[in-house]
Image: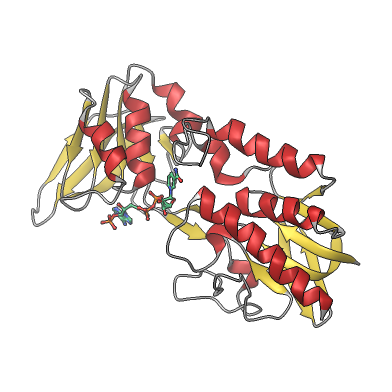
Amino acid sequence: MYDLIIVGAGPAGLSAAVYGRRAGLDLIVIEQTPMGGGQVVDTYEVDNYLGMPGINGFELGQKFRSHADGLGAVFKSGRVTAVRDEGERKIVETADGASYEARTLILAGGAEHAKLGVPGEEEYRGQGVSYCATCDGAFFKKRDVAVVGGGDVAVEDAVYLSRFCNKVYLIHRRDSLRAAKSLQEKLFSCENAEIIWNSTLQRIKGTDLVEGISIRQNGEDTERELAVEGVFLAVGMRPNTEIYRGTVACDERGYLLAGEDCATSVPGIFAAGDIRTKALRQIVTAVSDGACAVASAAQYLRL
Ligand code: NDP
C-alpha cells in the first residue's frame, strides 16, 4: 500500500510528485502516455511560465518530468479505468488489468480537446482535421488552413501556423477574442492571418483529405466556402473525469469540485490542475495545485 498514488503526469501531477517525494511519501505516478508531460508538451512556445520566457512546451514538460524522476518518483504506465474508495484504502485500476492501492490519491488527469460535432470532423480527423497545431502544423507548410476558436489556444495556434502556412483563417463565433491581449496583438500583426468574425464552421469537406470548409455568418442563411487543406479545432477543453463520476462530486461541466486545498468530496482524494473547478487553468496554477494537494494529503495522512 502506497502513501500516495498520483493519476496523471502533467504539470500538476509532476509537481505533486516533486512535493510528495520531498515530503518523504512513498508514491507512484500513473501516466497514460510514455514520458508524460501533459498538454504542455503539445505547446510550441510557453511565454508566461515564470523565469522561462519563450520555452518550448515539450522541453518544459521534459524538465518537469526529469525533476520528479530525479527525486525518485516511480512511474507506472497505464490508462486508469476505475477508482474505488474503501475509506482508508483507495484502489486504482488500469486498462491492462493492474491494480494499485494507496491511502491517498491525487487526481491530476487534466482535460482534453473539445469536439465541435460538425459533419466531416470525425471522418477527416488525421486527414486534415487536427486538435494540435504544434503536433500537425508542419504537414501544412505553404498551404491554406483554418483555425476555429477565439481563446488562447486558437490564437496561439493561428500565430504559430502563420509562420509557415500560406494563409491562416481564424474563425470565431463572436466579435471579440477571449485570448490574452498580448496574443491578440501578435495575431493582428500577422500579415497572412485573417480573422473571420461572428461565424461558425458548418462542415468540413474533401475526398480522401480535407479540401475545404463551409462557414456561416451569424444571422445569415447562406454558407460560404473556404478552400483550406487543414482545419485546427481549438474550441476549449473537457475534463477527463468520466471514470470518477459517481465517486467524486463534479460541477455541471464535469470538473471535480475542489477548492484551493484540492480536497474533493471524498476524504483522502485530492484533485489538482485542469481537472478541478478553478478560475484560471494555466501551467503555473496546475503546478501550484500539485504542491497544495500534497500538503493536504500529508495532513490527511497524519490524521
Ligand atoms: P477557451 O475555453 O479559453 O476558449 C475556447 C474558445 O472556443 C472560445 O473562444 C469559445 O468561444 C470557442 N468555442 C467554444 N465552443 C465553441 C463552439 N461550439 N463553436 C465555436 N466556437 C466555440 O479554451 P482554450 O482551449 O483556448 O484554452 C483552455 C485553457 O488553457 C484556458 O484557460 C487558457 O487560458 C489556457 N491556456 C494557457 C496557456 C498558457 O498557459 N500559456 C496557453 C494556452 C491555453 P467564446 O469565446 O465565444 O466562448
In this view, the residue farthest toward the front is 51
Visible residue check, residue 50: yes
Could you say where residue 255 lies in the image, as x and y percent from the top left?
51, 68
Visible residue check, residue 231: no
Which residue shows up at 54% across the image and 35% down it? 57
Task: Answer with left or right where residue 262 lies relative to residue 203.
Answer: right
Could you say where residue 98 lies in the image, as x and y percent from the top left?
85, 59
Could you say where residue 30 lies in the image, as x and y percent from the top left?
76, 53
**Res 155 → quadrant:** top left
Which residue shows up at 21% across the image and 52% down it? 173
**Res 230 → quadrant:** top left
Colour convention of the picture = secondary structure
Image vertical order of residue 103 relative to residue 48, above or below: below
Which residue shows up at 56% across the image and 73% down it? 258
Camera-nearest residue between 252 and 44: 44
Task: Answer with left or right where residue 75 lies relative to residue 208.
Answer: right
Camera-nearest residue between 281 and 136: 281
